Amino acid sequence: MGWAILLAGLAHAGPWTRDLGSYYVQGGADIYMPSEYVERGRRAGTSDDTFTGTLYSLYGEVGLSPAHPVQVVFSVPFARYRVDFERDDAFRTATGSVTTNRMQDLRIMPQVALHPEIPVALGVEVKQPMYRNNRVCKEYPIFQEVCAIPGDGQTDITTWVLAGGSTARAPFWGELAVGYLHRTENFYKWNTDLVFVDGFTWQSTVGANLGDSLWMVKTRGVKNLAADKVTNEYASVSPGVLLTFWDQVGLDVHVAWEVWAKNQSRGVTVGAGVSWFN
């Protein structure tokens, strides 16, 4: 499904937990172009279907506590999906396109530092859909089997452990986050018999500070804990650069692609974002 890999463009929390008054906010846009288009839980797209996804997102980290580093991390995405399709019946070949505009999955994660000096943290992320899959293309029933749905439509809970470090004499740094992804069947106003399995998830970054720029390579992915025919799993790689202007403003440019995927689309994401931080 095209929505899943649009996540590759989203920023994600690191192990350096913010103090009270510290913040990071990013507004971004990403375009996803799959080479293999799959709609999990509904059908596999035919070779004549093409999909383009655009994601607009607001991401933030805000420090909350004066006594010990505690922050809240949030992501609010809006997605636009376009499917161009071709269908044959007994009389003719029909071509067309259908566009879906929906809020995607809201993500909120409280995070607490586990050590006063070493960058190690614990976070619990909740993913909650802001859409109803049974309402997508409801006004155009003939297109419902073609429309791309925004997501799985249910709540996920991920427990993360985050750690990081940097070198003393060179400008290199790295982050690693590993988590347990619990997939619930708590669907938002959608009756379906879909059942998902839990998984192991990770995010990593290696980078270098070169003047006013941060050069980095990110990876992220999910591996299911049991074989399954509908639950998505993938691994992606995303190189990018963050250019800093006026001390507190940055421009992020990145590209991402899946090196492996199951039960979801594979393709390339290209995106950019503007950030404000202190």
Image (cartoon, rainbow, N blue to C red):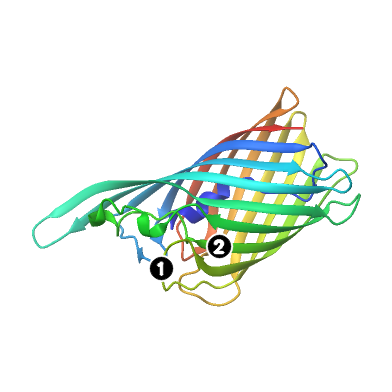
Circle 2: element type: strand
Q: Looking at the picture, which amino acid does disc 2 mark?
A: Thr
The label number, if any, that marks residue 191 in the structure image? 1
Residue occupying image coordinates x 80% and y 49%: 70
**Residue 45 placed where, x, y %?**
34, 60
Give the residue displayed 25% in from the left and 51% down from the top.
140
Answer above or below: position of 190 versus 113: below
Q: Residue 188: where, in percent of width, then height?
A: 48, 61
Q: Which residue is mark 2?
A: 155
Q: Are marks 2 and 1 in contact (CB under 8 Å)?
A: no
Disc nearer the start of the sequence (2/1): 2
| Three-letter amino acid code at the position of disc 1 | Asn
Q: Residue 4, labelled with which disc?
A: none
Q: Nearer the viewer, residue 187 or 264?
A: 187
* Mark 2 and mark 1: Cα distance apart in space: 14 Å
Judging depth in this view, the residue of 152 and 187 nearest the camera is 187
